[in-house]
Structure formats: C-alpha cells, structure tokens
Image (cartoon, rainbow, N blue to C red):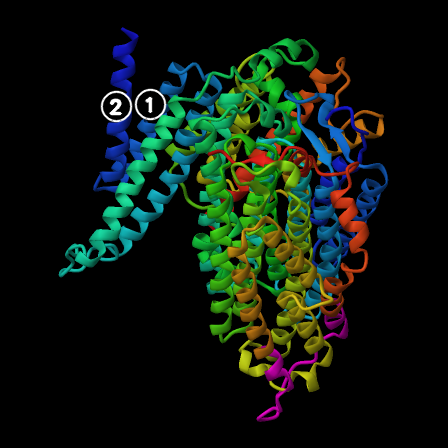
Amino acid sequence: MSVVIDILMAILLIYLALRCMLAPELSKTIFTFFAFGLTLALAWIRLEAVDVAIAEAAIASGFMGVLLLDSLRDFSYALSKNPKNLELPENFTIKESNKSLLLPRLALGIGFVIFLLISMEATWKTPEGGGLTAVSEELLPQSGVEHPVTAVLLNFRAYDTWLEIGVILMGLLAIFAAGGVKNYRKPSMTAVDPLLRQVILFFIPVLFLFGAFLLYFGKTGPGGAFQAAVLWGSIGILFHLGGWPIFAMIPRKLRQFLLTMGLGSFLILGFLLMAAGGAMFEYPPAYAGILILIAETLAAISIAVALTAIYVYLTK
Amino acid sequence: MTDLPTSSYPALLVGLPVLMATISLFFKSRGNAVAGLIGCLLTGGLGIVSFAEVTQRGTLIHILGGWKPPLGILLRMDSLAALFIGITAVVGILISLYAWWYFSSRKVSDGKFTLFWSLWLFLWAGLNGLFLSNDLFNLYVTIEVITITAVALAVLSGRTVALFAGLRYLLAAITGSMAYLLGVALLYGSTGTLDLGLMGQALEPGATATFSLIIITLGLMIKKAAFPFHFWLPPAHSSALAPVSAILSALVVKGAFYIMLRLWTEVFGVSLSYAAGQLIGFTGAVAVIWGAWQALLQTNLKMLVAYSSISQMGYLLMAFPLLILAPGVASGSADWLAPAWTGMAYQVMAHAFAKSSLFLSAGIIVFALGHDRIESLRDLVAWKPMTAMAIGIAGVSLIGLPPSGGFMAKWMLLKGIFLSGQWWWAPAVLLGSLLTAGYVFMLLRLAFAPAREKIAFRPVPHILQVCALLLALGSFLIVLPSENLIQFLGGTESFGTGIESIMEGGVHGNE
C-alpha cells in the first residue's frame, strides 16, 4: 500500500514541478508552486525527516509563497495600469535554433546525461556508514536537550549554527550592498482592503503561537530557531501587507540591536564560556538546556527581523 | 590529533572579527569606519601573535564545545594554517589602512561605503575560519560566509558593470559551493565522519570516493577561477573598488586553493591517481600562459592585473602533479616534495603581497585620473614616483626575478620539477615568466616615457602610496627569513599533517 502512495506522490511531484515551470499564467505558476511545496513537505514526512518537512512547508510554501503573491500583486497592478506593457510584439516568433549551435548543445546534453548517470551510480554505491547518529544518541543526555537534531545544531556543532546565523545577517548586508542603503521613512498609512486586515489580524496570534511552540518543541522534537523564525518573520510581513509598517516605526538603534542580537549574544556566550576556562560553546551540562533555549530564542527573533527587513527593503 | 596543545587563539581568530563587525554596524559613517579600522588592526594583530605562538609551541588546537571529533568540530592551527593566517593578517592590515584613507578622502561620501568595514571583517572571520577548520561541513559554512561577503564587497561600488560582474560571480560561486556540498554529502554518507583526519583514515577507494574527489575539485576550481572556469574573475575583480579588488585577488581566491590542498593531501590519498595530478597540473599550466597572454592584450590596468591573477594562480596548481608519486616510484627517493611544497607556499605569499600592491596602485591611478587606461601611465615616474616604484617592485616579484619572493617560488618549483623528472612543466613556467615580463615591462616603459600632454590629476593622499609600496616591498622581504620559514613549513615537529603523510609514505598514485 505504502509503495503505491509513494509512487503516486513521486508522479504528482514531477507533474507539479512541470506544471509550475510550464504554466502559461503567472498566477497559476505561483499556486502550483504552493502545491508543489506542500507535496514536497509530505514527501519529506514519508522519508521520516519531519524537521525538514516543517522547514519545507514554512519556507518554500509559506515564506516564499507570501513573497511570490506580493510580486504577483505588483505585476497585476502594473498590468492594470498599462495592459500593453507585457504583451508580446506582433511579429514575435520563436527563433529557430541556429544550426551551428546544434553540435555543442548536443555535446553538452550528452555530457550532462553521462554526468547524471555517474552521479547516480556513485550515490547508489555509497557504502552504509551509519553517520554520527549512534554517537550523538549516546551523548544526548549530556547535551541539555532531548532531540538529537537540536543537540547537534545547538550543542555538538553550535559553531556551525552560530556561523549560519551570521550568514543570514550577511545576506541582509549583501542586499543593502547591492541595492544601496535606503533610509526607512515612516510611510503614511495606505488604504488596504478591510477584509484583508481582519484576516491578517486573525492570523498573527496563530502564527506567533505556532512559532513559539516550534521553538520550545525543538527541545524534545523536530523544530527550532530557524523554523520559528520563518513563522515570526511572516508576522512582520503580514503587518506590512496590512498597511501597518511596524519595521519603519521601530527606532533605528533598536532595529540594529534586534538584527544583531542573535549572532552577538551567541558569540558573547561563547567568549564568556571561554573566559570561564572551557572551550568556545562548552556549556556546563547543568545549564546547557536553559542556555540553549535563550540562545535559540534570541537567534529566532534576529532571523525573523532580518527576514522582515529583507521583505521591507525589497518592496520599497 | 586531540592530544595536541589546546589554545583559545583559534576561537578568537574567528570570534574577534565577527564581534568587531557586529559592533561597527551600530555606528554611522565616521564611527563605523573607526570601529572597523580598530577591528581590522586587532584582528591582524591577533593573527600575527598567533602565528608567532605556533612557531613557538607547534600545532595548536581548539575543541569547540568540548566535543571531540567525530561528533564535534576541531579547529587546528598547524604551520600551514598559521602561514595563511599570518599572510592574511599582514596584507589585511595594510589594505585596511589604505581603505581608511581611500574612503575618508573621497569627496562624495556614499552611505554604502560604510558597509565596507563590517563586510570586510566578516570576510576576514570567514577566511580565518576556513584556514583553521578541520571539518568538511564547517569548511562549507566558511565558504558560504566568504562567498556572500565577497560578492557584496564586489558590488559595493554600485556601478552597473560591477553589478553585472557581481551577479556572474555569485552564480559561479554558488555553483561551486553546491558541487562541493554534493561531494561532502557523499563522503559523509560513506564514511560517517566529517573530520578531515578521521575521514582520511576511513575513506576507501571506490566509485564514491572518486566521484566525490572529482566533484569537490571541480567546485573548488570554479571558486578558485582555475583555467576553464576563470571567466568570472576579471570583470568581478576589476570593477570593484581598489581595496576590495586587492582583498579579492590577494586573499579570497587563496581560500578555495587552500581547501583543495588540504583535501588532496589529507583526505583523498586513496583515490588520487597520477593522471589526476597531471590533469590538474595541465589546467594550471594553461592558466599560466593564457592568463599572462590575455593580460598582455588588455588596455585597462585593472583588467591587466586581474588576468595576471589567473596566470599567477595557475602556478599553484602546477605543484599538484609533483605531490603525487608516479606508479612504481619509491617514496624514499622523492626528494622533490619539499621544494615543490615550499615553492607553493612562497608563491602564495609572493602573489598575495605583489597582487594587493598592484591593485592598490591601480586604485591610486584611478583616484588621480578617474580612469585606468594603460596609456595614461605615461610619465608616471615624474608625477607619482612612489606608485611607479611600487608597480615596478611588485611586477619584478610577479615575473620572478631574484631576489624577490616570486623568484623563490618559481625557483623552488623548477627545482621540484627537474628533481621529479617531470620536465614537461618547465617550459610553461618559463614561458609564463616571459609573458609576465612582457606586460610588466610594457607598464614600466610607459611609466618612464615622457607625457604627450600635461596631465590634470586629483591630489592623492601620500599614505595611500606608502601602503602600496610597503606591500610591494613585502614581496621581497619574505625572502629574508626564508631559511626559518622553510624549516617552519618543513620541520618534522610542526609539519602540516598533510605534507607529513606525504613525506613519510608519499601519496601513491593508483594505477
């Protein structure tokens, strides 16, 4: 039975991926993308990777979906103003492929297929190493948390996670670097559909609670700072979509503090532990649980603010 | 490896620049630059101090979180890592000082330039982290840090050319990262560890190991701009701001090379073959000649310097075939390993100094004239004698004339080539030097030629020229402690783990 479900799901995934790329209208593409993300999350659950499934559902379908819907709104706005903007010119025909390019393309295609075959062979022949699951399970009681993934992310390999939190901040800086620094001005309240505002107001507490649940649940099950941050980040975005520009209302210094505190507090914790005589990120076992929860919460807030900041910056 | 002396230097080398970068974000224009410069000086000072510490105590390690590998991550600072960190520190300090005066003397202070300091500190942290890392996945994270900050720095000038070049750079770098990550996933699946040392012991020859070797090497070669993948480098490096070009060309491309060196010597021993080494060496040789030839054809100074980077980085790859023994050669007779190894180390140092100096000099010329057409170098000796001198000295080191660091590098490399009997690499080394001499003397000829008309230029702060000149002199000064440095790199006590295994058993080529 489960084999049939798996096969059906695989077919559905490929079908949705194709539809998503080939759909003639943008709106259809985006809605198919939603469905694709959710199906993919289901596939991850079938592969017994629940944490990946949550991240997939939250990021690919949730966060990306909101961003895509927003750009769709902008497109339809531009189209309604000047419908001829995006129309193809009358004499537009797809050019026949140049014959001189045929050979290199063929070579490229064959090379790609060979590469694919070799990589599949290498993947199938991968010997079973078992990974680090056994070691991490064994040392789990000393880590202060009860779920192996959280233990690996925030204790055993906290250094990697700390750097990744930094990467999100650097991504934000990189967007500023590419687009130029803009000053956030307090925009006047814009007229928004009252129904939309009601829906948003209804969803925000739900999102907040679900995020907090995922954050705390990370101690015992799949979940954690990054997943919670995505949900909290979408709260910020929903506020902006509803016409409440909360990001611009926060004073600049506080904004900077919120953005950097995840990375900064984690680092200062590491330095303090080093000053106390241990290695960087060497938690005393008795306090490991609470220290991890604090570090995670601050990181989640920082990441959420960073995601909101990226959205606000790009939609200005 | 976990019984080596522990130290907090490795953790501080990554933590301190991140802390200073975060602090500098809180300040606006002037305060930001002050905090950034202080951060750079502190990070550089720490790099030099920790280098000195390694020369005294040998390899230092830091076990993060107290969890030993294979579960945790280990930072290790052996002589090779210490050398790269030391070079980054010295070159980084001089570039930072240059950047301080370069930005503060710009009349129109664009708000974006304040991002330079935090991005550069984050990049520095990423580089230090990369040199220290002993873990395949952690290496990927440091690559990510470096890629994001390097691309952001490259587009900082805001010019359309820079944005286009930056986008291409980003796409190339991400493709490289993905290829690397795929290889890491396969290796982790087959060995169950991410620690370099443990993986080197656990890896067995087979399709998985060979495929991982190929895909990881390909990914790193894209990031290093090795020959067939060099297309992104010249536009990205030449369209960036002067201090950024120097950072990207002198330091960032070395990161990917460093990982490649580590992995080939420490992990992939079982799946390397003589042919693989020859192939890598061949791409290096082509890069040496092609890059130098393209540099000769350029009409803009910064493009010329960028193509010269492709050529000079090619020399580094030419040492790889020498490190792999041909089938049937006894490891005891391989006396060319040490010269090849030191030649490679010297090439890294000499290129870092000379190339940063050349890009900073090009920045001075752009600063004074508003453009960098090579034709405008006419009469440079008269109106900017110090810059002309810096270009001359750095150029001599690039060519490899004695007594420069570049000469040491090429001499050692040639020595290794002839000792190993792989004489077919020698013409590439010599032809590369000849072509390099061609473009360096083309610049110098113009610098000494009398001007056709009076040149109107903006005054340039004196200190900018001093920084460029000091870097150029650095490429000569590294020769002075050569005996100690060679001993440091080759000494049995503090030998890098990779070369140690090479010296002991030799990485045997498979049939």
Q: Is residue B238 visible?
A: no
Spot occupied by residue A210 in the image (x, y as percentages of width and height):
51, 20
Spot occupied by residue B173 in the image (x, y as percentages of width and height):
49, 47
The answer to whether residue A236 is magenta is no
For disc 2, the chain is A
Q: Amino acid at mark 1?
A: Thr
What residue do we see at 38% from left, 14% from top?
A46
In the image, is residue A280 above or below residue B319? above
Label 1 crowd bin: few (<14), some (14–19), many (20+), radius 10 Å = many
Spot occupied by residue A241 in the image (x, y as percentages of width and height):
44, 39
* Residues at marks 1 and 2 on the same chain: yes
Label 2 crowd bin: few (<14), some (14–19), many (20+), radius 10 Å = some
**B11 to the left or right of A195:** right
Spot occupied by residue B305 in the image (x, y as percentages of width and height):
57, 67
Element carrying mark 2? helix
Judge by depth and name the residue closer to the eye, A32 or B316.
B316
Which stretch is magenta? Answer: B443-467
- Reading the image, the residue beneath label 2 is A12
- The answer for how far apart the CA atoms under marks 1 and 2 are is 8 Å
Q: Quadrant of the N terminus of chain B?
A: top right
Q: Earlier in the sequence, mark 1 or mark 2?
A: 2
> Mark 1–mark 2 contact, CB under 8 Å?
yes
Judge by depth and name the residue closer to the eye, B149 or A291.
B149
Q: Amino acid at mark 2?
A: Leu
What residue do we see at 33% from left, 23% from top?
A39
What residue do we see at 54% from left, 82% from top?
B375
For disc 1, the chain is A
- Reading the image, the residue beneath label 1 is A39
Residue lying at the far top in this picture: please name it.
A1
